[in-house]
Amino acid sequence: MGLMSRSDDNEKERVATLIDQNLKTIYSDLVQEELPDRFKDLLAVLKAQDAGQKDSQ
């Protein structure tokens, strides 16, 4: 009962491979998307604040 057949192992490996491939595809697509303007604006504000802090020290 506790023994897994070779086909069960193969199926689990196949599923794990598919999940891995799908996650890599999604991550790759996400990384290639352009950063939204509001995030770019926020980063610019944070950089300006950081530069202001360095100048006042």
Image (tube, grey):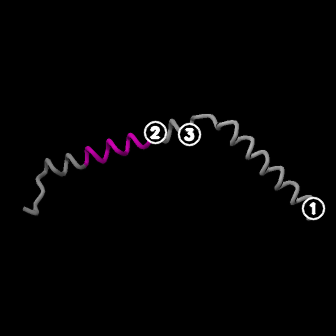
Identify the residue at horizontal 79%, vertical 47% (top origin): 45
Q: Residues within 10 Å of mark 3 (few under 14, many from 20)?
A: few
Q: Residues within 10 Å of mark 2 (few under 14, many from 20)?
A: few
Q: Earlier in the sequence, mark 1 or mark 3?
A: 3
Question: What is the chief secondary structure element of the magenta stretch?
Answer: helix
Q: Position of residue 17 (x, y in %)?
A: 32, 44
Tell me the magenta residue range.
Answer: 13-25
Q: Amino acid at mark 1?
A: Ser
Does residue 45 lie above or below 3 as drawn?
above
SS at circle 1 = loop
Q: Position of residue 9 (x, y in %)?
A: 19, 51
Question: Which residue is identified by label 3?
Answer: 31
Between residues 49 and 10, which one lies in front from this camera angle? 49
Q: Quadrant of the N terminus?
A: bottom left
Q: Amino acid at mark 2?
A: Ile
Identify the residue at horizontal 86%, vertical 54% (top origin): 51
Q: Amino acid at mark 3?
A: Val
SS at circle 2 = helix
Q: Earlier in the sequence, mark 2 or mark 1?
A: 2
Proximity of marks 1 and 3: CB atoms separated by less than 8 Å = no
Identify the disc placed on residue 56.
Answer: 1
SS at circle 3 = helix
Identify the residue at horizontal 78%, vertical 45% (top origin): 44
Identify the residue at horizontal 42%, vertical 43% (top origin): 23
Proximity of marks 2 and 1: CB atoms separated by less than 8 Å = no
Between residues 54 and 11, which one lies in front from this camera angle? 54
Question: Which residue is identified by label 2?
Answer: 26
Does residue 9 lie above or below 53 as drawn?
above
